[in-house]
Image: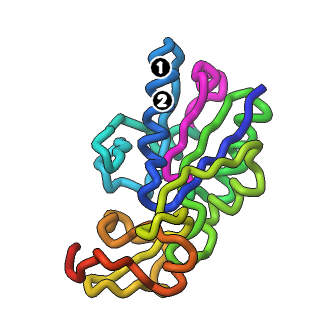
Amino acid sequence: MAQLYFKYGAMGSSKTANALMTRFNYEERGQQTLLVKPRLDQRDGDHMVSSRIGLRYPCIYFDEMRKINPMELQQNACIIVDEAQFLSKEEVDYLVSLVDDCGIPVICYGLRADFKGDLFPGSEELLVMADKIEEVKTICWCGKKATFNARFDKDGHVLKEGAQVVLGANDQYIGLCRRHWREGNLGPDFKADQT
């Protein structure tokens, strides 16, 4: 039975690497997959998903997938969506219909919340609608589980105001535990102007 999965984690938790490994595992066994991401995210180049550890693979954009006939989509063992936090509520509802009405498993990877601690719209809807929710874990500099995304400036100050989405600024984000996110503490080894 097809299900909708939401696999979320803080910055640096290898969500994209996991998405690409999932695609590889299916296709290594002769099963076709469809790798998708929102058009908003073009920081890795046109029609490309890239992880921080160097894994890369071509993808299609979400709006392009919506133009594909559901019968054609059913040729895939699953649909893998990277950067799912950037989806709208309506786009998540479309994924729900692919799962429920077409029997296509959908695996979404993304952030749960932004640097201010607010849910992204796509993540909020996935938390409500997903059949299975999994956390992709990473650690804070202190060794505790990192659950928050901190955005920081060139002087090492943790920011709590600004636009929700700033693409292409991976060197300005770090995963922190709740305590250190609240304190704005990037750790003893952080050096200002390291960006």
Q: Is residue 124 magenta?
A: no
Q: Is residue 136 above or below residue 175?
A: above
Residue at the (59%, 19%) spot, across then down: 75
Q: Position of residue 139 (x, y in %)?
A: 47, 60
Circle 1/circle 2 CB separation < 8 Å? yes
Q: Is residue 74 magenta?
A: yes
Report which residue position mark 2 lands on: 23
Q: Which residues are drawn in magenta?
A: 67-84
Q: Position of residue 136 (x, y in %)?
A: 55, 50
Q: Position of residue 195 (x, y in %)?
A: 22, 73
Look at label 2 and name its amino acid. Answer: Arg
Classify mark 2: helix, strand or loop: helix
On-image quarter of the N terminus: top right
Look at label 1 and name its amino acid. Answer: Glu
Residue at the (33%, 79%) spot, across then down: 188
The mark found on residue 27 in the picture is 1
The picture quadrant where one finds residue 175 is bottom left
Q: Is residue 45 above or below residue 194?
A: above
Residue at the (37%, 65%) spot, across then down: 167
How was this image coloured? rainbow
